[in-house]
Structure formats: C-alpha cells, structure tokens
Image (cartoon, rainbow, N blue to C red):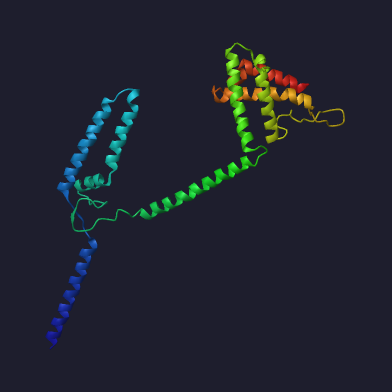
C-alpha cells in the first residue's frame, strides 16, 4: 500500500511538472516569421524604391524640384509601410511587430493599440473647430455692433477701392499729387469716407488732443468744423496712399518714408495740423 501511495504521489508530481512546463511554453508565445514570403515582398518593394531613386536623379534643375520631392515622398511612404517594416524584421530573423508574415507559433500584436488615442484626437478636432467658429462669430458680432451698419461698412470699403483706382488713373494722366487730391470726385469720396470713419470711431479723424504747455491753463488742440472739413480729406488721402504703398507695393517703412508723394502729403498734413 505504501508503494502504491508513493506511486500515486509520484504521478501527481510528474503531472504538475508537465503542466508547469506547458504553461511556460505557452507564455513564451514564440512567433515564427515566414521568411520566404517576407523576402519576396521586400525585394519587390526595394526594386520600386530603387526605380524611384533613379527617376528622382534624372529630374535635375529647379524646374523639377517639386517632382523630385514627390518621388522622395513616395519612397518614404514605402519604407514607412508597416508591411515593409515587418518584412525587413523577418528577413533579419526578428519577429514581426505589425502582424505580417507570421508562419506560426504566436499571434500578431494588435495593430490598433493606438486607436483610442486616435479616437480622442478625432473627438477633440470638432471641439477645436467649434471654439474657432465661436471666436469668428464673436468677432463678427463686434464688428456689426460698431458705430456703423453693415451697409455703411461695405460703402466705406468700396470708397477706399474707388479712391485708390481713381488716383492711379489720374496720376497716369499726368496729374500731380496735389491736383489729384483737389479733384472733385476724389474730394467727394474722401469727404464721405471721413464721415463714415468718424461715425465708426468718434474723434479718429480729428487732430490729436495734446495739452499745451505754459500759460497756466491747459487747452486742448481742437479743430473747428471748417478745419475738420479741410483736414479730413487730406488725412484720408494720406492714410489711403500710405496703405497702398504698404499693401500693393509691399514697401517697407523705410521705403514708404522715402517716397516723394508720401513726403509731400505728410508735409501738407503736418502744416495743417500746426495751424
């Protein structure tokens, strides 16, 4: 009986060892790569990459820069392809990491491990777009609630364009800057534009209010209605011309300051401001 009990006990020990060994074997989960298939795929892609490099080398000169860049992008995309990466690993004797070219011994690692992060990013995108839309809407409302209506704002922008185009046409006819500024149409448009600007931002077309030093009392340099009527068109013409130099001609500050007509307009404006 003792021997029988010892035999039974011994069989239990052997069974436990076998189960432990089986667990160890399963936990190792060794992946065997399909070398022939991986090699064939890699050689095919390598041939395509070599052809792209050959084509890119033939595209010389500045005119073909964009085409060379496109070839380089295609080459990078092929090298970064997960299947090509796995093929390269298997050929070198390493297990694939993206689930391709597995012959047996284990299962591929999930290729969508980063899916939650991608989903979070996609969910965040609409939120960002909503914030941007809200900011645009808020800015639009602020503009609409300014001192002038939407129609008046459109009129103001249209007057700016008309003045620039008309001044360019008159200058092409041989008129000087002074003659252009006195042209009946220009004067009318500038006057209306000044009214709209003043309505939009009260005080924007008047001279700067600076306290006069001396005399014991502080006096503000305010202009009467007649002076504003004369100064308004001049200020508007100066502003429009300066803006044209900056936006259309792409002048730097130094180049604008050196422009003869700019200097002439500025001198006349400064002279009126000192009166």
Compared with 123, 231 (above or below) is above
Q: Position of residue 233 (x, y in %)?
A: 69, 23
Looking at the image, can residue 70 be seen? yes
Q: Residue furthest top?
A: 174
Q: Position of residue 250 (x, y in %)?
A: 54, 23
116 shown above or below 63: below
Q: Residue at x 65, y 22 (%)?
A: 238
* Residue 170 higher or lower than 7, as above or below: above
Residue drawn at x 30%, y 40% is 77
In the figure, residue 75 lies in which quadrant? top left
Point out the image quarter for the C terminus. top right
User: Which quarter of the figure has residue 112?
Assistant: bottom left
Residue 138 is situated, as x and y percent measured from the top left of the image, at: 58, 45
Q: Which part of the image, by quadrant, shows the N terminus?
A: bottom left
Q: Is residue 25 left or right of residue 117?
A: left
Spot occupied by residue 253 in the image (x, y as percentages of width and height) = 59, 23
């Amino acid at each position: 009986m003792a021997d029988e009990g010892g035999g039974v006990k011994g069989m239990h020990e052997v069974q436990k060892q076998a189960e432990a060994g089986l667990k160890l074997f399963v936990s190792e989960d060794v992946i065997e790569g399909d070398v022939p298939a991986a090699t064939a795929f890699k050689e095919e892609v390598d041939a395509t990459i070599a052809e792209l490099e050959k084509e890119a080398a033939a595209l010389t000169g500045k005119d073909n820069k964009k085409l060379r860049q496109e070839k380089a992008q295609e080459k990078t995309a092929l090298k970064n392809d997960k299947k090509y990466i796995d093929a390269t690993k298997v050929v070198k004797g390493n297990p694939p990491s993206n689930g391709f070219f597995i012959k047996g011994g284990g299962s591929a690692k999930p290729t969508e491990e980063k899916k939650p992060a991608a989903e979070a990013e996609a969910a965040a995108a609409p939120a960002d777009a909503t914030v941007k839309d809200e900011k645009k809407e808020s800015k639009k409302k602020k503009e609409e609630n300014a001192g002038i209506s939407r129609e008046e704002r459109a009129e103001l922008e249209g007057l700016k364009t008309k003045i620039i185009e008309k001044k360019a046409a008159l200058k092409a006819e041989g008129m000087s800057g002074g003659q252009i500024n006195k042209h009946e149409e220009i004067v009318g448009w500038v006057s209306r534009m000044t009214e709209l600007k003043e309505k939009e931002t009260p005080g924007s077309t008047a001279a700067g209010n600076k306290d006069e030093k001396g005399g014991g009392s502080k006096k503000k340099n305010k202009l009467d209605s007649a002076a504003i009527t004369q100064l308004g068109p001049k200020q508007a013409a100066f502003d429009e011309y300066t803006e044209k130099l900056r936006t259309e001609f792409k002048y730097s500050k130094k180049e604008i300051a050196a422009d003869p007509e700019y200097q002439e307009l500025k001198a006349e404006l400064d002279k009126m401001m000192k009166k």
